[in-house]
Image: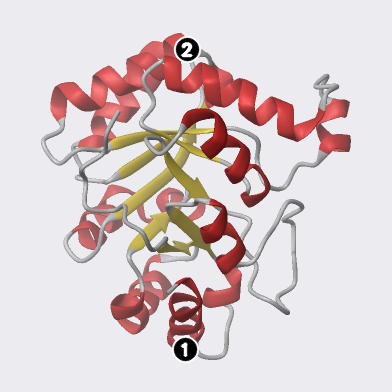
Amino acid sequence: MKVEDGLRGKVARLAVAFDSDLQECRALLARIRDEIDVAKIGLTSFAGSGPRFVREVVSEVPVFLDLKLHDIPAQVAGAAARAASLGVSYLTVHAAGGGAMISEAVKAVESVDTRGTRILAVTVLTSLDDGDLGSIGVADGAAKQVVRLAELALKAGAHGLVCSPLEVGALRARFGDDPILVVPGIRPPGSAAGDQKRTLTPAEAAAAGADVIVVGRPITGAADPREAAARIKAELR
């Protein structure tokens, strides 16, 4: 599926993760608004601030609502429809929820949304490595599992995928230019990995074919978040 949503281009876009309380998120957005392309609102912020904050941010910058929905198809479809009504650009579901769940999410956003919410299927979390996957019964590692789930999700109609930067090249080679690839696990040179296990730098992820890179703590935890974001934007260019 060709995506004409204004969020893709030759230069990878920068999404910053907003994962604190409402006042802190508002202050951060005001400070870095001109240096970012997308605001990622995850579970922490959504649980604390809810749709109200999403609506505020949508009026200023495209929103990636990262809820990683994973439930029976009817529940995910209902949640996806309500998320789309907020005007978000991206919404995540877990690919492991299966083809029917993903398909229902896609149909739900298309039935109610006029702004073009894109369903992104999360493949394997960037906090997991091969050992972690083995402990839950996935014996052949992250690289193969990501491609397996990606194929399932795209066949079900997902507009794009969330993967670690280590899998971007393989997904581009297999599926071409059409899927939106949104890539967390980004760590600028010298940054602490934290709980991320499959990482690359912004420039490396962009060169591999990422459409959107997601950065959290290296920007939000910096002494000067605006400067940190500007450095990453310069690296992407």
* Helix, strand or loop at mark 1: helix
Q: Residue at x 87, y 27 (%)?
A: 134
User: Is 39 left or right of 225, judged from the image as shown?
Assistant: left
Q: Position of residue 27 (x, y in %)?
A: 36, 79
* C-beta proximity under 8 Å, tags 2 and 1: no
Considering every residue shown, the one lying at the far left of the view is 114
Q: Residues within 10 Å of mark 2 (few under 14, many from 20)?
A: many
Q: Position of residue 12 (x, y in %)?
A: 42, 60
Alpha-carbon span between mark 2 and mark 1: 42 Å
Count up the numbered dots. Answer: 2
Q: Label 1, on which residue?
A: 227
Q: Position of residue 121 (x, y in %)?
A: 48, 31
The residue lying toward the viewer, choosing from 167 and 38, is 167
Q: Residue at x 62, y 51 (%)?
A: 165
Q: Specify the quadrant that holds the N terminus.
A: top left
Amino acid on which disc 1 is placed: Glu
Height in image: 218 above or below 108?
Answer: below
* Helix, strand or loop at mark 2: helix
Q: Position of residue 63 (x, y in %)?
A: 31, 54
Residue 99 - label: 2
Q: Residue at x 65, y 67 (%)?
A: 187
Residue 28 - label: none
First in residue order: circle 2 vs circle 1: 2
Q: Residues within 10 Å of mark 1 (few under 14, many from 20)?
A: some
